[in-house]
Amino acid sequence: MPDVRASLRAQRIETPSWAYANSGTRFKVFAQPGVPRDPYEKIADAAVVHRFTGVAPTVSLHIPWDDVDDFGKLAAFAAEQGVTLGVINSNTFQDDDYKLGSVTHPDPRVRRKATDHLLACVDVMDATGSTDLKLWFPDGTNYPGQDDIRSRQDRLAAALQKVYDRLGAHQRMLLEYKLFEPAFYTTDVPDWGTAYAHTLELGRKAQVVIDTGHHAPGTNIEFIVAFLLRQGKLGAFDFNSRFYADDDLMAGAADPFQLFRIMYEIVRGGALDPASGITFMLDQCHNIEAKIPAIIRSVTNIQEATAKALLVDPDALAAAQQEGDVLAANAVFMDAFSTDVRPLLASIREEQGLDPDPHGAYRRSGYAEKIQAERVGGVQAGWGA
Ligand code: LRH
Ligand code: MN
């Protein structure tokens, strides 16, 4: 049995700067009182999540949403707050030039512009000390015949190679796939197979990101986790949950059993340990619910799924699997999933000098009231869609 308490103490979950700001759907982004107005305030909120959970010491940035004059100064501010700047996310999905694609656009001028942005994100990594560049491309087409599917793959591969060659020795790129949206006929990186093939072509510094909201309904995501882990090509997760499409809801809210099955493959693959190099991130939008409590809930949902996964008895499971005892094997799994792990997590928090109930602790902290009173005026940060 893995040392459950030690594994849970060592768990690390990165929170996304953009989840603290206004974000929502194409229909409406609802503003909320107390929302950050700049990356400094986003990082301050992320530090509060870490203060109450103890497992969220890094924050991912999105460029240009988190552009500042001095990234070194931002990194120093983060350190003062007790957190570190993490994954750098590129953005080739909000510029008018990218209507027909960014790195896959038919026009070489547009492709160069997009690639230059990706290279500029590596410059940001150099300034913040980040090691991971996360690349998600909205690129795709809406109608058959609109563009040549094969040529777009050639353009994508060429751009990825250019960025790959720019990476420093300790830096890597994480390629994210998504089935559809904003494109509705072809998407140039639509699934794990396409992402995997491109990262194989590139080399060891390229790995795949699994965003749990980016699959066709019914996709067995834990199979993808097991497969990419086996290939050494699983680089990171964007955790969230969904009932239908890329809903970006709180991780574990829509399907806690799926999150448990995913975390079980992580535990089984020996990939929970931070040394495994997998970055566990949230990628969510809190359009109608208060943002910081929603992120704390998402973190504890992942902790609970992880604790249950760590409680799967590997010997009993292996024995039942070996004997072909289907029901017994499934029972071992369900016993772990049906275990209430909240007392275990509460005692680990107490052991770490944290309040056993981070949700209540945040409510009692008065932080929500404080930022609502302070953050008056100015322009609330958002994803500006
Ligand atoms: C794309 C995505 C990507 C981010 C964006 C905020 O849907 O998952 O990871 O860049 O959301
Ligand atoms: Mn994502």
Image: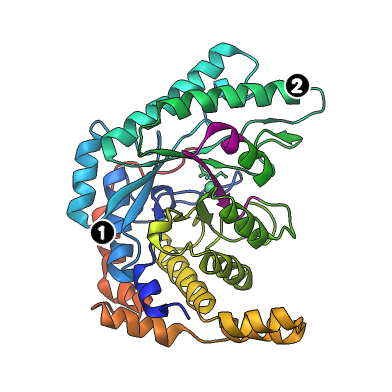
Q: Between 336 and 138, which is closer to the camera in this rendering?
A: 336
In-image side of 12 versus 338 (left or right)? left
Look at the image and say whether residue 105 sits in the magenta stretch: no
Q: Nearer the viewer, residue 163 or 376?
A: 163
Check if residue 201 falls in the magenta segment: yes
Classify 301 as above or below 157. below
Callout 2 crowding tier (Cα within 10 Å): few <14, some 14–19, many ≥20: few
Amino acid at the residue labelled 1: Ala
Q: Residue at x 54, y 12 (%)?
A: 109
Looking at the picture, does residue 310 appear above or below residue 41? Answer: below
Is 122 situated left or right of 316 in this image? Answer: left
Circle 1 residue = 373
- Element at badge 1? helix
Q: Position of residue 108 (x, y in %)?
A: 58, 12
Specify the segment rendered in magenta. 198-214
Which x, y percent locates residue 126?
Answer: 30, 33
Q: Nearer the viewer, mark 1 or mark 2?
A: 2
Quarter residue 343 falls in: bottom left
Q: Nearer the viewer, residue 55 or 163?
A: 163
In this picture, residue 144 sits left or right of residue 277? right
Identify the residue under disc 2.
148
Q: Residue at x 27, y 82 (%)?
A: 351
Mark number displayed over residue 359:
none
